[in-house]
Amino acid sequence: MKLLILIASFAVLASAQSPGGDAKHGKEFFLSYACYSCHSFDGHGGAGARLVPMPLNQAGFIGFVRNAGRMPSYSSKVLPDAKLADIYAYIKTLPVSPDAKNIPLIQELLKEK
Amino acid sequence: MDRRGFLKGAAAGAAAFVAKPELSGAQEAAAQNAQNRGANGSAAEPSQVALARETGARPAESTRVIEHPGSDYMVDVIKSLNIEYLAANPGSTYESLHESLINYGDNKMPEFLTCCHEESAVAMAHGYAKIEGKPMMALIHGDIGLQHAAMAIYNAYCDRVPIYMVVGNHSDGARRNPGVQSMHSAQDLGALVRDYTKWDDEPLSLGHFAESAVRAYNIAMTPPQGPVLIVCNAEIQGDPMQGATPRIPKLTLTTPPAGDRAAVQEAAKLLIAADRPQIIAQRMARTPEGMTLLVELAELLQAPVNSQERMNFPTRHPLAGTGWQGYQPDVTLNLEVGDILPQARIDRARGAKTIQITSVSVAHKSNIQDFGHYADIDLDIGADAQATLPALIEEIKKELTPDRKSVFQARGAKLAEAHKKAWDDQILQAQYGWDSSPISLARLSAELWPLIRNEDWSLVSPQGFVGNWPTRLWKFDKHYQYIGGQGAGGMGYGAPASVGAALANRKHGRLSVNIQTDGDMNYAPGVLWTAAHHRIPLLTIMHNNRGYHQEVMFVEQQAALHNRGADRSHIGTKLWDPNIDYAKMAQAYGMHGEGPISDPNDLVPALKRGIELVKKGEPAMIDVVTQPR
């Protein structure tokens, strides 16, 4: 819950988009900085929160990473804004999951007694 | 002396030995030992058998025959305990007992299971006991084998699981050979693992062995259950039996300690008066009866059951879970909870009462801190929870008024509604990453379920590292359908425990499924060969995330804390470059192996092929490349 409030706060506070990042570089950073380890390789979550669809704008995303709460926070010394902008751009390219309504097996599980 | 000359001299010595007049047993043994040690007491010369190994020559026929070694009697004692299997990696400190078990004992009750590591042997016994509810034997070689076994013993100790261990030792310094035999022996062998063994003894005679062997079984099975160890002297094993055969004591299991009557009455009153009770069941339910009792208690109270560590409550029971959102328990009943402190803190913060029932309260040791913290609680019943539930249930039935019953029914209806919502929410969570490659653990678990749900299945692996997806998606309602975790969190448990559990399931015709983490697999993969060799049907599905994923996250946390980048967190934590080919690993050990499977669309056909083979009685492995968690 705390995490959601934080995310929401950053989304509201961040009023302007930073310059667009490079998704190709962002993918490299997403992997090399091991973002995937908690958020999965395509951002659908695991031990960490789901990143897709990304609820924050770029400034909100960068602000969150700087003071993340439950997740480790990364300073600009180790993850400069430019790299985070690239990571953000990459996350925005990741496809959303299919809706549960369109997954027959999930529908079957929901009906199971 | 060069090697050829050394061997020639030894052969001459052996021939001279045959020509000597017969000696008394003790003298003969001494003479043999003297010969083995060498005439001048310095360099050890090879025995006749060793000589034959070296030269290929057939040794002269020995005049020394021991037709009734002490180890035959030990087999009689072990057979009296009705142990089905013994898991062992061979070793010379128990060679006489080994021979007696397979020949005199006809390799039945117990049957020998060849293991490639002592840790595998003990962890197999761990998994077996969790299904079968009784110990398997692990036969261990001296101090080197026992040190290999140590981590698995510790897991079983913390998991309160009975294991019957026998370890060989050359105890008599006057008869022990220099060199290897000395290095493999100890004056107090049990001390190596005593901190995390429930009981150990080193019998000094066959009569002593009989008493201690039967007592050890009794102690292992008395809650809190745990591993026990009998140190078995090579001399007592190998010497001929003399005099009257000692009587084998009758095995009578100690009844589990049940809770004090007054304390149980107080617990009943607190639970009846509670508006929002909660039951937390951890290592509760040693047997299927424990699960039946827990269901009865929960239904009587209409209280939610937070089930952990064991299969002790049906996952789709309307009372399974932690209650509706905002459900703040005012009384918690904690059954065999390992460390009560976290719950006690929560209870104290909200003014709730904490009741604990655990046998560990009256039986823990000093050094290892597995017993957890001392905590402020309101009622601490030092007793086995399962043995105490009948009295608690009776007391609640006796004290329950129609008014309270009516309140309970209303609560139960609300809890059932909350359970259904929580269940559906969990299923819906599986949609995220459904099409991902590597494959999501939710997808893996979801796709597996329809393939096994109509079988008599058993999940023989821990779930913590697979996001608990099986519990979140499958319907567990039988005691043997889940065996819980490692106990002490020691890795290397999963693969062998699954083989042991699958062995226990085999005679019941159950389909055993192991979702196997890759880090754990690589501690002692030789257990795959044991599964293949002994035809143990087991479907192993690799959760191949190519790393020690938990540790990746921990290193990342530390990097952030130290204001350094996480871009080196793969160092020391990842299992890539090269990727490990588990299909080939399985094939090398003699079982079906296929993969790596990264496309979710390829998953079901591969799982089906694996299941078909397992249903025919074989082990099979499917390597699935997975998301980290």
Image: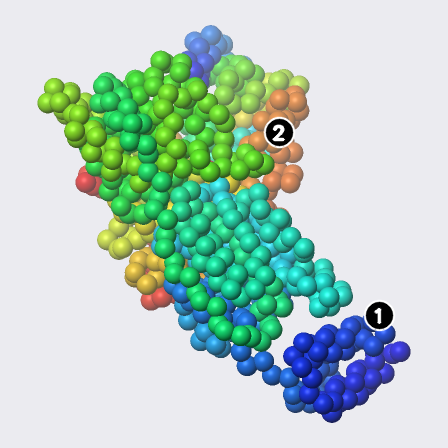
Local secondary structure at mark 2: loop
Circle 2 crowding by C-alpha within 10 Å: few under 14, some 14–19, many from 20: many
Q: Chain of mark 2?
A: B
Residue where numbered disc 1 is placed: B42
Local secondary structure at mark 1: loop
Q: Residue at x 22, y 33 (%)?
A: B393
Where does the image place residue B26, in percent across and percent down from the top left?
67, 76
Q: Amino acid at mark 2?
A: Ala
Instruction: Using the rendered view, name the quadrant where residue B388 is placed.
Output: top left
Front position in the image: B154 or B394? B394
The residue lying furthest to the left in this view is: B402
Position of B335 relative to B171 (above/below): above
Front position in the image: B602 or B461? B461
Residue where numbered disc 2 is placed: B566
The residue lying furthest to the front in this view is: B243
Position of B132 relative to B519 (above/below): below
B430 displayed left or right of B411: right
Front position in the image: B546 or B519? B519
Instruction: Using the rendered view, name the quadrant where residue B306 is placed.
Output: top left
Q: Residue at x 31, y 40 (%)?
A: B387
Where does the image place residue B432, in percent across and percent down from the top left?
37, 34
